[in-house]
Amino acid sequence: MTKDGARTILADVMERFLGVACKRLPDDVYAKLRECAQGETSPLQRAVYESYFENLRLAQQLDRPCCQDTGLLHFYIRCGADFPYIGVVESALGQAVARATASAPLRPNAVDFFTERNTGDNTGERMPWLHWDILPEGNQLEICVYFAGAGCSLPGRAQVFKPSDGYGAVVRYVFDAVSGLALNACPPLIVGVGLGHNIENAGVLSKMACLRPLGSANPHPRGAKLERDLLAGLNSLGVGAQGLPGNRIAMEVHVESSARHTATIAAAVNVSCYTHRRGFITFREDMTYSQSSYKGVEL
């Protein structure tokens, strides 16, 4: 297959995949949202959840995005070094985003910083955003697509603490972030916490934490316990869907970490709203593909 042929296939498939991902929650997120709804007892919370599921039903029926803010497109890529078409991935994803803006449709959200002009097709300077992990072995292209809306982006924050502040400072920081601006992100939330050595590495880790499959746990026992403790603590705040009184401000808390410097403790928090639009798709070297986020969906 030529590179142009691979680019065409990748752009076409990803355009269709974006059309699905903006209108339908991934299976794991939908199931967790149902679980959260069952845990609420107040009439007000039940009414909010009923409106959530009615919105999701109508998005399917009317073939429209399930949230008016379709965000900016982020792609988190794991690519084997032996994948033969790595050179066309960036251009193909840009084509897919531009075309999906019209075909899905997606709200045009990309605004150039210095001209203050909307590009009209969700592409622009370093947009769509691509985060690459190149694997030393392998011949597959794995893509996680994420719709980064404003509501879930506004609460994002990162800070570097002194070791003398202790790990308790991280817990307080997470609570301050989630109980403040995160109420505007349409709870129940997925909360991603990144722990590392500086702002940028903690920030990336916190976003990667948000994108993990629901039901997964940090591989270290202490990391997994921190996730459980943060989730229990946040859900004891008495905040529920839409920031109204309730039992579940968070669906899950995920923590990702790296080694830290002896003199720093970096922490970052990212959240995703209940319309957590992220999907996983894998391309093989012959450009056949499979997706694992939406059971029964054919692209």
Image (cartoon, rainbow, N blue to C red):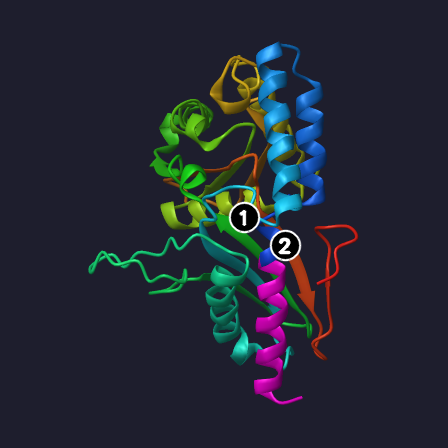
7 w.r.t. 227: above or below: below
Mark 1 closeness class: few <14, some 14–19, many ≥20 residues within 10 Å: some
Could you say where residue 46 lies in the image, as x and y percent from the top left?
63, 17
284 w.r.t. 155: above or below: below
Q: What residue type is labelled 1?
A: Met
- Residue at 39 percent of width and 34 percent of height: 155
Q: What element carries label 1?
A: helix
Q: Write down the region rendered in magenta.
A: 1-18
Looking at this rendering, what residue extends furthest in the front direction?
62
- Residue at 60 percent of width and 61 percent of height: 143
Q: What residue type is labelled 2?
A: Val
Q: In this view, does 224 lie to the left or right of 244?
A: right
Instruction: Give the image quarter of residue 240.
Output: top right
- Residue at 49 percent of width and 43 percent of height: 206
Could you say where residue 35 lies in the image, as x and y percent from the top left?
71, 26
Sequence-earlier tag: 1 or 2: 2
Mark 1 in CB contact with mark 2 (< 8 angstroms): no
Q: Name the residue under label 1.
A: 208
293 w.r.t. 143: above or below: above
Could you say where residue 264 lies in the image, as x and y percent from the top left?
38, 40
Tag in front: 1 or 2? 2
Magenta: main secondary structure: helix
